């Protein structure tokens, strides 16, 4: 394979990779927003849970029962991570770097 054919193959590969990553961007943006909202809700709920004076006086499960916003936010965040949100959020940056690493 001469250098001209290699250059054309590389350009075609780059165009296809760019097209694929650009198709992922809208979905990735939505997943990032979901992750940000749930993370902020969890952090806010955790702060309210920690500053509540009753948290130290009751059992762990009772304190979680007394703070349903934190409990639901935390369960939602854990469920999102088990569903693979971390992969969906970083996918557009992960694919090009791994493809280029194997291509060169």
Image (cartoon, rainbow, N blue to C red):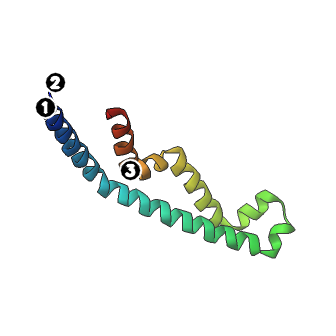
Does 41 sit left or right of 57 as displayed? Answer: left
Whether tag 2 and tag 1 are in contact, CB under 8 A, the answer is yes
Quadrant in which the N terminus appears? top left
Disc 1: which residue? 5
Label 2 sits on a secondary structure element that is loop
- Identify the residue at horizontal 48%, vertical 45% (top origin): 84
Label 1 sits on a secondary structure element that is helix
Disc 2: which residue? 1
As measured in the structure, the alpha-carbon distance from the residue carrying label 2 to the one carrying label 1 is 6 Å
As measured in the structure, the alpha-carbon distance from the residue carrying label 1 to the one carrying label 3 is 27 Å
Quadrant in which the C terminus appears? top left
- Identify the residue at horizontal 36%, vertical 55% (top origin): 28
Residue extending farthest front: 3
Disc 3: which residue? 93
Disc marking residue 95: none
Q: Position of residue 68 (x, y in %)?
A: 65, 65
Q: Position of residue 6 (x, y in %)?
A: 18, 32
């Amino acid at each position: 394979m001469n250098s001209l054919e290699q250059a054309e193959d590389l350009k075609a590969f780059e165009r296809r990779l760019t097209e694929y990553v650009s198709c992922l961007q809208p979905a990735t943006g939505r997943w990032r927003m979901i992750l940000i909202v749930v993370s902020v809700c969890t952090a806010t709920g955790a702060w309210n849970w920690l500053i509540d004076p009753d948290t130290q006086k009751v059992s762990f499960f009772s304190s979680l029962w007394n703070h349903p916003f934190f409990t639901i936010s935390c369960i939602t965040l854990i469920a999102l991570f088990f569903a693979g949100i971390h992969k969906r959020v970083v996918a557009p940056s992960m694919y090009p770097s791994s493809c280029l690493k194997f291509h060169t």
